[in-house]
Image (cartoon, rainbow, N blue to C red):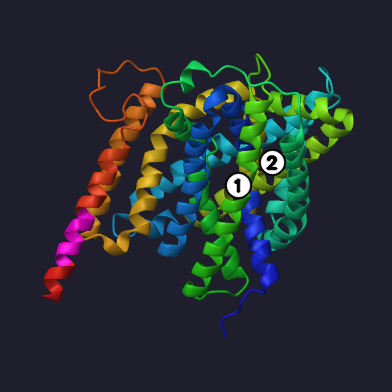
Amino acid sequence: MDKQLKPFDVLGLGFMTFAFFLGAGNIIFPTMAGMLAGEDAIPTMLGFLLTAVGLPLLGLFAVAKAGGGISDMTRMLHPAIGVFISVAIFIIIGPLIAAPRTGLVAFELGVKPFGENPVVSQFAYSLMFFALATVLALFPGKLMDSVGKILTPLLIVLLVALSIAVLTASGGQALPTDAAYLEAPFAKGILDGYSTMDALASIMFGMLIVDLLNKKGITDRARQYRYLVIAALIAAGGLAFVYVSLFFLGAGFGVPGATSGGVILTTFVEQQFGTLGLLVLSGVITLACMTTAVGLLSACSDYFSQLTPIPYAGYVIINAVFCVMMANLELGVLIELSVPVLVSVYPIAVALMLFSVFSGFIGHKKPALALTLSVSLFFGVLEGLKAAGVNLPDMSFMPLYKLGLAWVLPTVLVLVFFMLVGRVKTQAVTS
């Protein structure tokens, strides 16, 4: 008989999902965007929530609907296409950008605020950080217990305390709105939400959750779907709570000359609570980054171990070593490197999510998926080249091109066209 999760276990699954998402970018980017947006913080925040909460929710729904990850979503096409997209996303959210960023931000916000010459060097800290993440990731069957039932409740308590402090504090200042946010703050918020990488990670975390449920003996597709949807809603609610608090923090307690949201956060905490507050913040940041690092290492290693003869444990160690190497770059350098990559890959990922969620209404699914991915790939590469500073012909005639969202309308039009085709086909069959 197929097993079921107890209510407390379902809650733990949701907390674990929330903890996986809440990492480095989720803390530094909304705070910085709130400060730069100034008086336009509300529309910027709404755009940010659309991509940083809405898209991860869509990604988990897509995994639940398809019953698996990208390979399942693209199963009607050649298998190499699904593998190519999966590998590209796993490398981005794994050893290349997202996972190393967790260790780097944990050091920047958890160690450096205590002195210009910290006792622990950046290399030594990243080595210890990813060593602990490796130990936790080597036991994937216990992730729901260790992360969902132990680490996350503690993290939530600390985040609630920080949020209450933000909402009740006084004496801050709102800085003038940055020029980049004056023309279209909502659209700028959408692009800022890309930087969290959660839409990409949602597909991978969804695969990891399905695998964890299988390991616990829950193999019924309908039951997996229900548990995954519940976990997605819990994670989305938690992320929205954190983002709103951090946007208000950035907008109301700006720090002139701040180069990252981490500077704003540590300055606020030190002013309000002193050294003790910085110690608590260090705990919040370390826990948030650690849980995400564990989730990313587990998801990446689980996928790559299915492609090659190297076992899961071997990939955990390999990925951790690469993370230590990348985590010793400057935070600004790592963020700058990530932008062109993200604006290239996001359109493809979002197009795949939309197709999977609405596949029941789409006619001629195989050509529809092929054309949808082709269109999103073309515009994604175009946006990536533009973000990298490559000189391109003037394409300002395209809708939303100046806002960095030229891919949206063509991709949606392709999906709508095939949905209309599917409706006509259904009506014809019914008649």
Q: Is residue 123 visible in the rendered structure shown here?
A: no
- The nearer-to-camera label among 2 and 1 is 1
Count all numbered tags in the image, as a single digit: 2
- From the image, which quarter does the N terminus lie in? bottom right
**Location of residue 122 with respect to 138 vertically, above or below:** above
- Tag 2 residue: 289
Q: Position of residue 340 (x, y in %)?
A: 44, 27
Give the camera-side residue of 135 and 387: 387
Q: Report if residue 419 lies within the magenta region.
A: yes
Residue at image location 55% in from the left, 57% down from the top: 232
Magenta stretch: helix, strand or loop mostly: helix
Q: In this view, does 59 lie to the left or right of 284?
A: left
Identify the image quadrant of the C terminus: bottom left
Residue linked to disc 1: 239
Where is residue 296 shown, x and y percent of the image? Answer: 60, 47
Question: Does residue 286 appear left or right of residue 100 in this picture?
Answer: right
Task: Residue 125 in the image: state x and y as whole percent.
Answer: 77, 32
At numbered mark 1, what does the secondary structure look like: helix, strand or loop? helix
**Residue depicted at 43% across the width and 57% down the height:** 62
Q: Nearer the viewer, residue 349 or 423?
A: 423
Tag 2 secondary structure: helix
Where is 321 relative to 134, above or below? above
Magenta range: 418-425
**Residue found 66% across the figure and 18% down from its top:** 258
Q: Which of 318 and 6 is in front in this view?
A: 6
Residue lying farthest to the bottom in this orientation: 1
How far apart in space, not on screen, are marks 2 and 1 (Cα)? 14 Å
The residue shown at (36%, 22%) is 386
Amino acid found under the numbered disc labelled 1: Leu
